[in-house]
Amino acid sequence: MTNFRNLSQPTGRTIHIHEQSYLFFGGTAYLGLLDNKDYIELFKEGIDRYGLNNGTSRTNNVQLGIYAEAESFMASRFGFQDAVLLSSGYLAAQVSVKALVENRRVYYAPGAHPSLWIAEGPKVDLPFSAWKTRVIDEINNSSETNFAIISNAIDNLTPELFDFSDFQYLAEDKNVLFILDDSHGIGVLNKNALSTDLTALESAKNIELVVLASLAKGLGTDAGAVFGNAATLDKIRKHPIYMGASPSSPAALFALVHGNRIYEAAFDKLHQNIDIAKSLFSSLDGYHNIANFPVFTSHDPNLYRYLVQHQVLISSFPYPLPTSPLLNRIVVSALHEESDISQLAEILMSQHRLKL
């Protein structure tokens, strides 16, 4: 079978290899900005203004103004008092947990991304709903006062959107910091917004909310963001990870700040494609999807090979362990045309008929 591990092209709508063309329904570039010509031109304009990169720390006495401008823009865009930008989502996660959880008892949710780990991986085997009930009970009955809850906002693999509203029932004498990773949901499920409704957390006086995200997924930017209140993010700005790391490309942040019109058009196209896919896939068994998210998953061990034979490439890997069954991830993006999705649906239907 063809090996797709050494490509020299964008992983956009199609992949060309060995004189063959494959429709690509995989990856995490949900809004297709990595291969959007208008967005690429905006990035090039940023290069013309700022150069290729800026290899100095954010505490250097000589600074480019685009960094503070982008942080202010992102805070306003997603409804937070302040935002901090780093060169990757991994750094955004690491600086958040290392700067903020000291002197707090930490609870990790199931499936928390490795970038959120303070040390070794937490072992949490419960489903999210059962874990949530247990944690609320333990905190409310604890003699301790200060806690941190660390979780993904969305599980992009299963997929599942996590509901945090029950945490409003935490006892008022418990101070709880939430650090939530919305890398796969920010700006994707909801336009210019987070993936999940956090109103219940925001309204609780004893709860503080910090949200972080890799912007390299839907938002097409090699950077990581941390959102929260100004006092908390000041702690992050004083942490050695933030102070010592080179920042993201200024050209990338220029495109992020000035590309909202392009983003919104891509968002609208993506959600049109999601609706088309849901309609066409509705008669198929064994595919799981959640509202407003462009991922359809299947555990069919033969699906990947069948689709490759029909010139379609998807993401396929064991999950959640290396010994687990294959999890197949069909990803619809803003780059796809209706004919692409119809072609995929016909292939899936033909496989479905073969099984009957």
Image (spheres, rainbow, N blue to C red):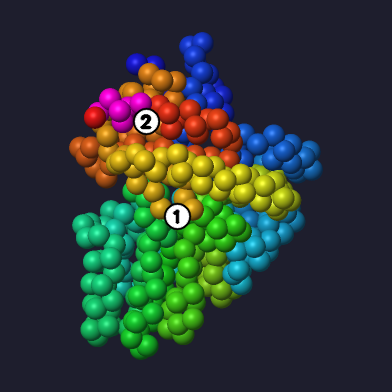
Magenta stretch in the rendered image: 350-355
Say few, some or many: other residues with alpha carbon within 10 Å of mark 1 (under 14 / 14 to 19 / 20 or more): few
Amino acid type at image mark 2: Met
Q: Main secondary structure of the magenta part?
A: helix
Where is residue 216 shown, x and y percent of the image?
Answer: 54, 45
Say few, some or many: other residues with alpha carbon within 10 Å of mark 2 (under 14 / 14 to 19 / 20 or more): some
Which circle, 2 or 1, is nearer the viewer?
2
Where is residue 222 shown, x and y percent of the image?
Answer: 57, 44
Residue bearing the label numbered 2: 349
Q: CA distance from mark 2 to mark 1?
A: 22 Å
Look at the picture and state if 305 lies above or below 213.
above
Q: Name the quadrant containing residue 297.
A: top left
Amino acid type at image mark 1: Ala
Q: Is residue 53 magenta?
A: no
Tell me the residue at 37%/30% (across/down).
349
Tell me the residue at 24%/78% (across/down).
137
Residue bearing the label numbered 1: 291
Q: Is residue 353 magenta?
A: yes
Secondary structure of the residue carrying tag 1 is loop
Looking at this view, is 327 or 321 the one in front? 327
- N-terminal of the pair, mark 2 or mark 1, is 1
